[in-house]
Amino acid sequence: MVGAIILGIVAGFLGRLIMPGKDKMGFIATTLLGLAGAVVGWLLFTGVLGIGDQAMFNLGGLLGAVVGVVILLGLFRLYRHHEDGTHHRFGT
């Protein structure tokens, strides 16, 4: 359990470092994002691609967790952009 929390903290902060933005998240939200990213990364790499082991929360899965965080942040920002009603076209 402690390993999962540490993984969530590290993955959350690394993912937000890779994708900086104006997301208003504190420490707990970033940790929860990291934990959710670990699940998404584990499902992607182990379930879809067949890479990795069956341990969801371990430091070896940090790369998958960070990838999961980046995916979740991207989806969140797309959703938020859609909810704002600001639709921009390329080239305008």
Image: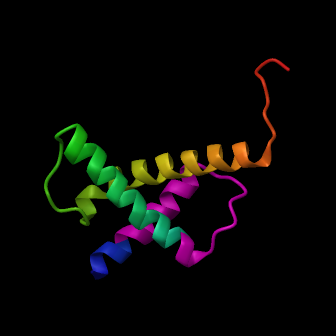
Q: Is residue 27 above or below residue 63?
A: below
The C terminus appears in which quarter of the rendering? top right
Please check the rendered image and state whether residue 28 is part of the magenta-colored stretch, yes or no: yes
Residue for point 56% across, 45% down:
74
Tell me residue 34's x, y (percent). Answer: 44, 64
Residue found at the far bottom of this picture = 2
Residue found at the far left of this picture = 53
**Horizontal side of residue 66 vs 58, given as left or right:** right
Q: Nearer the viewer, residue 82 or 29?
A: 82
Magenta segment boundaries in residue numbering: 7-29
Tell me residue 72's x, y (percent). Answer: 50, 51
Tell me residue 82's x, y (percent). Answer: 71, 43
Q: How is the image coloured?
A: rainbow
Q: Is residue 40 above or below residue 11?
A: above
Please check the rendered image and state whether residue 16 is part of the magenta-colored stretch, yes or no: yes
**Horizontal side of residue 79 vs 33, given as left or right:** right
- Number of numbered discs: 0
**Horizontal side of residue 43 vs 14, given as left or right:** left
Q: Nearer the viewer, residue 34 or 84?
A: 84
Tell me residue 51's x, y (percent). Answer: 18, 42
Residue found at the far top of this picture = 91
The N terminus appears in which quarter of the rendering? bottom left
Residue for point 17% across, 62% down:
55
Q: Quadrant of residue 2?
A: bottom left
Q: Is residue 59 above or below residue 74?
A: below
Dominant secondary structure of the residues highlighted in magenta in the image: helix
Residue for point 78% across, 48% down:
84
